[in-house]
């Protein structure tokens, strides 16, 4: 994908603002964010395909039927998943409290929750936290990004320009990731805002196209969250844009956010980028790219800068239903070839060792059997991942 | 499965012997083993479904066409994978050297190699190591188990009795595992020896039935080795056995070996056993059980004894193509219920915390939608796994 003009510091499109606060769910830091447009927006969303989704996903799917949103309210630390009918009721109360604070209709407010599964949502804290929060709305998307962090080490927001007939529109993404990241037809939490004028069906079409090639090709640990949500809201203030321009901008923003999320995966030191070419078709390229990016043995190799490059063959070959012909396979790490015609050609190469310690680590695999291409994003698997996740609930 | 009479110390069936030696491929310890029967055996084998299998697998598939074997020669540390036509030639040389040493026909010798992928097989060291090794053949299967270890922390051999009309036959398994363990239609390296009289088709049928329910439901890290091999040899010395008795014994031995391999997974502290009931069918039960046993977030929960039990819902729900109905799902850890009707009912329970630190950790999930059942075996994911695999090649 091309790289349109990213803003040096992320900014909001015209008419969008946000606020965040500490309502007391997390032990420290902000844990509640509010994103709002000054007018109702055309909107589209994709949610997790996990079969046991959280209450906000169940309610959110209903809300998105309308194709319109004006605000999103998000808390971190408790995900409101595995909480039954009471969880649904609390999700609705969360949306209602935000609507009341903003003076807008309830059906225009989407709620999200992220964090531990199976713990009741502290709805009173959220309701109290929302009171007066509309007075703190401001133009910096990073403020909203701070309130939705769980194990993320930094807030994540990016924005980009989209040309219009007489100027430019803005597209802004705010997201969080870190662990339980292997989105499936949806993503972690990513909120996209634009002042371009686009209708809900166009947003939906573009969102699905782009998500499938970016967030859905991201894996930190192969675990698919029960709370994945990706929403886009367009308020139209900057006027119409060309759909192709919009999709290009959306693709660039989604790819940049995907890389931010991968690089900040739980415990991660480095972004791992896998590019597969020459697969039988795009579907098989995706399967192989995902297999490589998910393999614990690939991920530990990258973690240690240990040039155990034969593991590339293992992770390709375990895609047992894909067309893989040993004699046609080649691979390189960065600029250095490590396998040709299915034979490993590099061992103990100091250049390969160095490439594995760079950021990003770029691994290219060509299957040599067809036109299919795909890219997947992930990170190394580190001691830090284990430490965070062996005590996430207890700390 | 039932538990037939295991021998306190593993022993060989009548007519089987083994030897192991250090030929100098590993930095320390024995790295070459020879298993032999005094007569040709009916034999069957299953190999990895990885699409880029090692040279010994390619040659082994050919050899097994004959349905007959008399010996197996195995080296550790270098797997002879990703080595092209030269690798094939060296695999054949390895089998030929063992046949020469034993004075038996080459087609009756199966060769296996396990270890790093993509490194040329040090065939001269193996040929030298085999010379004179037939003088050291002995009756203790543990001796052979020692020579095939890679990152295993202890040699693995078990044996069990099978009733015959006038006494008993013996079934013995020798195996190694540790990492890159998510067998697919085959297993890591496991060699099974029996003096029961069974023909090759019966062995093949029983082996596939049992492997599918034991070794194929084992996962240390979700990575499928390029060298997985499971072979059974029957020399007939103890006479005929009932096929049902044999299959029961084979199932028990395979299950015991599966648990040994899981518990000794790279870096592992504990065996994790997942039992899924009430799935739509056995196929879906297997998918869900595997999802649970493979999930890094389940495995780190077990590692830390951190009762983050909502992760069970996540790992079930991410099986997006299975029938999962939130209201019907229940789960327990050991004897303690942790979810009912899809709602998490246990948090901060000290009993659950204690159960997660026991060995084995038993997790039961009932989907409540059908008759499908399955069990999967794995282990916790620890700092040790990362440490071993971030530097496996370099150390």
Image (spheres, coloured by chain):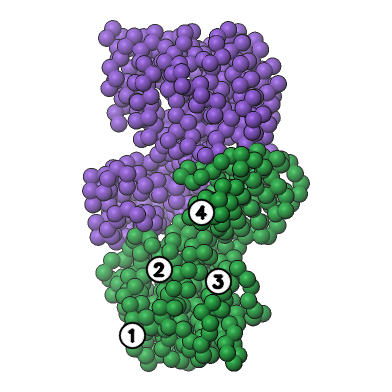
Chain colours: A green, B purple
Compare residues A143 and A28 and report the one nearer the observer: A143
Task: Identify the secondary structure beneath mark 1.
Answer: helix
Query: Splitting the image into 4 quarters, where does residue B170 fall?
Result: top left
**Does residue B143 show up?**
no
Task: Identify the secondary structure beneath mark 2.
Answer: strand
- Disc 1 to disc 3, C-alpha distance: 31 Å
Task: Identify the secondary structure beneath mark 4.
Answer: loop
Marks 2 and 3 belong to one chain: yes
Please name which of the two marks, 4 or 3, marks the residue nearer to the observer. Answer: 4
Residue B62 drawn at (x, y percent): 51, 24
Q: Point out the tag, 2 or 3, that comes first from the N-terminus.
A: 2
As drawn, the label of residue A281 is: 4
Q: Residues within 10 Å of mark 4 (few under 14, many from 20)?
A: some
Q: Residues within 10 Å of mark 1 (few under 14, many from 20)?
A: many
Q: Point out the tag, 2 or 1, that comes first from the N-terminus.
A: 2
Q: Chain of mark 2?
A: A
Residue bearing the label numbered 2: A47
Residue B19 drawn at (x, y percent): 57, 15
- Disc 4 to disc 1, C-alpha distance: 45 Å
Q: Chain of mark 1?
A: A
Q: Residues within 10 Å of mark 2 (few under 14, many from 20)?
A: many
Residue bearing the label numbered 3: A251
Residue B94 drawn at (x, y percent): 62, 20
Residue bearing the label numbered 1: A106
């Amino acid at each position: 994908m091309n790289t349109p003009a990213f803003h040096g510091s992320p900014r909001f499109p015209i008419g969008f603002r946000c606020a965040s606060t500490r309502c007391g769910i997390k032990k420290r830091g902000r844990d509640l964010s509010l994103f709002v447009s000054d007018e109702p927006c055309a909107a589209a969303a994709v949610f997790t395909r996990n079969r046991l989704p959280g209450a906000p996903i169940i309610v959110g799917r209903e809300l998105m039927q309308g194709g319109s949103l004006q605000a999103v309210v998000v808390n971190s630390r408790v995900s409101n998943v595995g909480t039954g009918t009471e969880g649904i009721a609390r999700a609705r109360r969360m949306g209602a409290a935000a609507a009341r604070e903003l003076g807008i209709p309830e059906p225009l407010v989407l709620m999200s929750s992220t964090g531990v599964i199976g713990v009741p949502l502290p709805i009173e804290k959220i309701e109290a936290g929302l009171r007066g929060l509309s007075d703190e709305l401001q133009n910096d998307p990073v403020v909203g990004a701070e309130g939705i962090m769980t194990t993320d080490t930094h807030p994540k927001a990016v924005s980009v320009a989209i040309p219009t007939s007489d100027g430019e529109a803005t597209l802004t993404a705010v997201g969080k990731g870190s662990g339980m990241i292997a989105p499936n037809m949806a993503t972690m939490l990513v909120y996209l805002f634009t002042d371009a004028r686009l209708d809900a069906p166009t947003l939906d079409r573009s969102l699905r196209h782009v998500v499938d090639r970016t967030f859905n090709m991201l894996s930190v640990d192969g675990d698919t969250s029960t709370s994945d949500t990706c929403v886009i809201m367009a308020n139209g203030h900057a006027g119409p844009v060309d759909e192709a321009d919009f999709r290009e901008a959306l693709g660039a923003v989604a790819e940049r956010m995907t890389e931010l999320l991968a690089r900040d995966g739980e415990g991660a030191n480095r972004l791992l980028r896998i590019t597969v070419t020459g697969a039988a078709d795009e579907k098989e390229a995706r399967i192989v790219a995902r297999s490589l990016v998910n393999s614990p043995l690939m991920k530990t190799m990258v973690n240690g800068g240990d040039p155990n490059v034969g593991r590339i063959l293992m992770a390709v070959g375990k895609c047992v239903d894909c067309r893989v012909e040993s004699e046609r396979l080649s691979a390189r790490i960065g600029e250095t070839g490590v396998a040709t015609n299915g034979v490993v050609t590099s061992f103990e190469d100091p250049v390969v060792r160095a490439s594995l310690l760079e950021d990003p680590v770029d691994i290219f695999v060509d299957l040599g059997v067809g036109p299919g291409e795909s890219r997947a994003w992930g990170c190394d698997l580190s001691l830090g991942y284990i430490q965070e996740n062996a005590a996430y609930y207890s700390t």
